[in-house]
Image: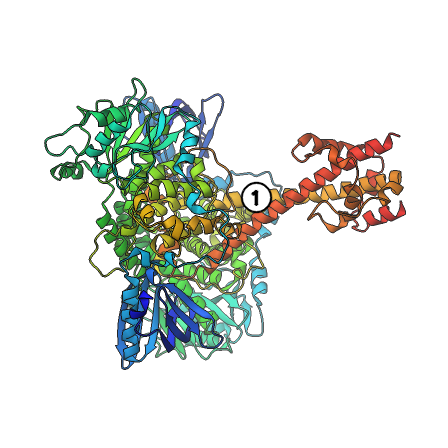
Amino acid sequence: MEHIRTPKVENVSLIDRASARKPCVGTLYLTATHSIFVEHDAERHRETWVLHSLVSAVEKLPATPAGCSLLLRCKNFQVIQFVIPQERDCQDVHALLTRLSRPERYTELYCFAFNPNLDAEAREESWNFIDLKAEFVRMGLPNSLWQMSTANREYRVCDTYPGELYVPKSATLPVVLGSARFRSRGRLPVLTYYHRDNSAAICRSSQPLSGFSARCLEDEQMLQAISSSNPGSSFMYVVDTRPKLNAMANRAAGKGYESEDNYANIKFHFLSIENIHVMRSSQQKMLEVCEQKSPSMAEFLWGLESSGWLKHIKGILDAGVFIAKAVAEEGASVLVHCSDGWDRTAQACSVASVLLDPYYRTLKGLMVLIERDWVSFGHKFSHRYSHVDGDPREVSPVMDQFLECVWQLSLQFPCAFEYNERFLLHLHDQVYSCQYGNFLGNCQKDRVDLRLREKTHSVWWNLWKTRADYTNPLYRPDHSQTQGVLRPTTAPYCFKFWRAMYCRSDPGRQRPPPSMTDVLTAVREESQQLEAELSAQQEKIANLSKILARKAGPMMKTADERGVASGSPRRTQPCLRGESESPLKRSDPDLSASSDQESGVTDLSCLSPSSGEESTKDPDSDEAAYSTA
Amino acid sequence: MEFAELIKTPRVDGVVLHRPFMPTVEGTLCLTGHHLILSSRQDSIEELWLLHSNIDSIEKRFVGSLGTIVVKCKDLRVIQLDIPGMEECLNIASSIEALSTLDSITLMYPFFYRPMFEVIEDGWNLFLPEEFFKDIESSTDEWRLSNVNKDFSVCPTYPALVIVPKAVDDDTLCKVATFRQGGRFPVLSYYHKKNGMVMMRAGQPLTGTNGRRCKEDEKLINATLRVGKRGYIIDTRTISVAQQAKARGGGFEQEANYPQWRRIHKAIERSNILQESLIKLVEACNDQSQNMDRWLSKLEASNWQTHVKEILTTACLAAQCIDREGASVLVHGTEGSDSTLQVTSLAQIILDPGCRTMRGFQALVEREWLQAGHPFQQRCIQSAFSNSKPRWEAPVFLLFLDCVWQILHQFPCSFQFNEHFLVLLFEHAYASQFGTFLGNSAAERVKLKLPQKTVSLWSWVNRPQEMEHFLNPLYETNSLVIWPSVAPQSLLLWEGVFLRWKRSSKCLDEAYEEMVHIIECNKELQSKVNALRRQLAQLETGDGLLGEP
């Protein structure tokens, strides 16, 4: 709190950048974690909360008679503009937000302050919700060919890898250690995905330290071991996700790529995904296109093209498709690497996993996948998403691109994904905002050192609890589209601009009409309520008819057998038929429209003396009551 | 029969057919007067039944004695026929060419087509101007139905009955007609019941270079203004195009003569530019390249999306003037039968919930396109694959449908019909067994006796068993004005038309079915719950009454 000299500014205007609408006036509160704007309008009292850690830049615009404008650019691509009447206040707020949005130490981050009212036990449980060991068991590991190695238990072999590594059983400890020495930062080839159907595996690593001619027997043995752990194939693929030119340039620095001459039975391929610097500037260019005030169609399309963004997305998806094809169609194992093996490799492996295994298209599955390929394998979250003030050259939208690939796939396969667009957007927010501890640090070791499990909460459990918000209404686990391997088209025209992600402060419209997903979700929710009401009704009818049957058994028996309620479930049929010819039926033509009737019915069942004890759910009970009467 | 001499080879065996997303089949190719038919040899199932009028162009290639004909259709489908024998192939090719470019309308298939269904509701009588006027009459008495054009002599492209201000008599109309392009004097297009404002359309005023004026014209359009109110004239052309039109006798309303009107110029392109744009877009979609830059630059260079944006923007402007500004609007371009109709019909979709229903949309197409004299015959004679030098063809109606699709996509619950219906209209505008889109004007349709000699598309579409394919399961009545976003980020390529034959729609179709399933389940549950509610109420009262005695 020591930074906050101006905790509150009155008469601030929140500008609606989208339209010429009148700005709303209110009070801006500055807390240790959020900027909160409360609208003065007595009726609405709308609040806008902006997390400091989500702010990527604070800009002061030239002063106008109305006051000073402050522009908040958020990491989730929202742009918020305040007008502050007093220049001095504006300066204060600017300085304060600049400071607060650029924390220097991890401990300043929101996750250390965020307390969702959980006790220690619940917190621990939230961390245990995603269990990677269980994930490997799900894939069928360990088995006769693959084992869990404890070589990296204390992060001694590779400090950016997880403590538990899955390697071929045939790879001895000296081979493991030798291979690690021959790889950038010790990131040796280890398994990340195992395709149970045909025993093919996706392994990942960093580049070999091959230079122009260096060899390493253990590394060659390691690859041989991976290859022979897949009895279904006589060869394996080694995939370098970098453009060939970049990989060749690395040879001068004593790094590089595998030569087919030195490694037995490998097929080597380049996949041409550009590096983090290219991706960063590409996204920047695309965002500039989005920010233009009413661009023409040509300006927009030209800007989109020259940003190269969709080309890069296609490149990543193509890489995933290549790997998935090798695994599913050729039954070959694949080793994937780039330079360090924590950006492009994570993208390519996880896209391939989504294509190969329907599990990763479920809510929990995507959480597991991100935990495995990104969190545990040392994707440098804190550097890439600038959680703490650091080298801007380390920042890059690597995760954004993975999430976008999944989104592009969901356009082609609308029934195959359990999660919806909102889930992907929310994950993006979480990766950047540090409300939870999951994405802090750059590797597992960092997170252990920061004692995040004790000091922060896990986002996964929270997402799981609110999963109803993130469920795709079109998803059905038994749908043919859901099953098996996805084979997307990657023709250029299949790639769309992701409007919901990059135009969060929509330039076109204030309140967009409900999307099809929203409507269908609402319909499904209503259906669920109806189902609940239906079974409650059936119960009530069962009870009531029992009472009726007892009171007026003989009369019911003489009733006609013609049914009325078409489509009503079988179990209620006997009493319905009994009622159908009752003279009372015609007395009220339409009761369904009246809500009073509903409550009336409820009252009756409450008053009914026998309803409590007789509320049995046995479908036969209706008939039993009927016949005993 | 006249066609016999055009069919050089009526039948060839061993022809192999290649189509998008379907297995290759071998069979017998037959040519009839109106169809190209391929029956598979095994079980003599017709694999292909293609209207000659749907064929936009053909290409022939030879490898030895095996000939190949690539057939490019107006619905943008491309199929390939491998025909053994050079002579057969040449004969088939020249026959198709002759049959697909028949000059006489009366030789077209609709004049020979006999429906296999009983016509219950004749589409030809479904949307009469009298009916439309009755609806307007119920809200205002300031307009009248004039039959000044009953023999199509005042304006050859207008229908016999038009709605004009009551204060203006037929003689005045005749004078105004001489001052407007093609005799298209200002007529009522839409009456906004919410505030009594109107939208009119016309041809350009024939002011010429010396600034001719016509008092009757001024009187006519001023008669639609409320006292002290200003109106808007939306000229769909840029000011410079409108200026140039003066040299050819056309022009625009001078401020001095129309002081109560504010003129706004927009930039909707003329038909030959639109045709070029369509050709480029389809070429871009058919490009086999995997290169993203190439795709995006070709998409941009086609300018198709720019046209969509411009037309929608202009329609929004017209709607805004009427609904937000509370002003009446007059829309025209040059002839008043292309861009003018795009604007007036789209503005009605934005403003009038009735136009978003199945019937309402049909009525809109009938009123604002067919009756209003959009020259369908000329515009739709060729599509994107045409080799011939373009004359009058232009995808004006397709652009309108594309714009409707954009709004439908943004407001998925506000339309009673679905995307399939829009695609259907696109197909039938270019090639059809129905007579609806034949001819260029109401006068031509009368002369051709289309209502007597052909079947209306609406007669078929409105049969319940057909209609169900075209109903939007998400539809909920929305009585509001809907304002579409015209930001470039919001406007998408209409894949249902342009990528229809490029990528399989299986997964999207499944999603659609799933959506229908969800809605149907909900409806079923609702009716079950309602039935049980009724039952419970009965049991309740029954219990009470039975307890009494």
Mark 1 secondary-structure assignment? helix
Residue B113 location, x and y as percent?
Answer: 41, 58
Q: State the colouring used for the structure image.
A: rainbow
Residue shown at the point (53%, 73%) measured from the top left: A198
Q: Is residue B228 left or right of residue B360?
A: left
Nearest the camera: A95 or B250? B250
Q: Using residue A330 as the reference point, say whether residue A530 is left or right of it.
A: right
Tell me: residue A40, above or below residue A573. above
Q: Nearer the viewer, residue A63 or B291?
A: B291
**Amino acid type of disc 1?**
Val
Confirm whether residue A597 shows in the render.
Answer: yes
In front: A208, or A542? A542
Which image quadrant is residue B200 in? Answer: top left
The quarter of the image holding the N terminus of chain A is top left
Q: Residue at x 68, y 42 (%)?
A: B529
Q: Say above or below: A125 vs A82.
A: below
Q: Residue placed at 19% from the left, 30% from the top?
A: B253
Outermost residue on the left side: it is: B210
Q: Chain of mark 1?
A: A
User: Residue B141 location in percent, x, y?
Assistant: 39, 23
Residue A572 higher or lower than A365, as above or below: above
Which quarter shows the C terminus of chain A? Answer: top right
Q: Is residue B424 left or right of residue B185?
A: right
Q: Which residue is mark 1?
A: A523
Confirm whether residue A503 shows in the render: no
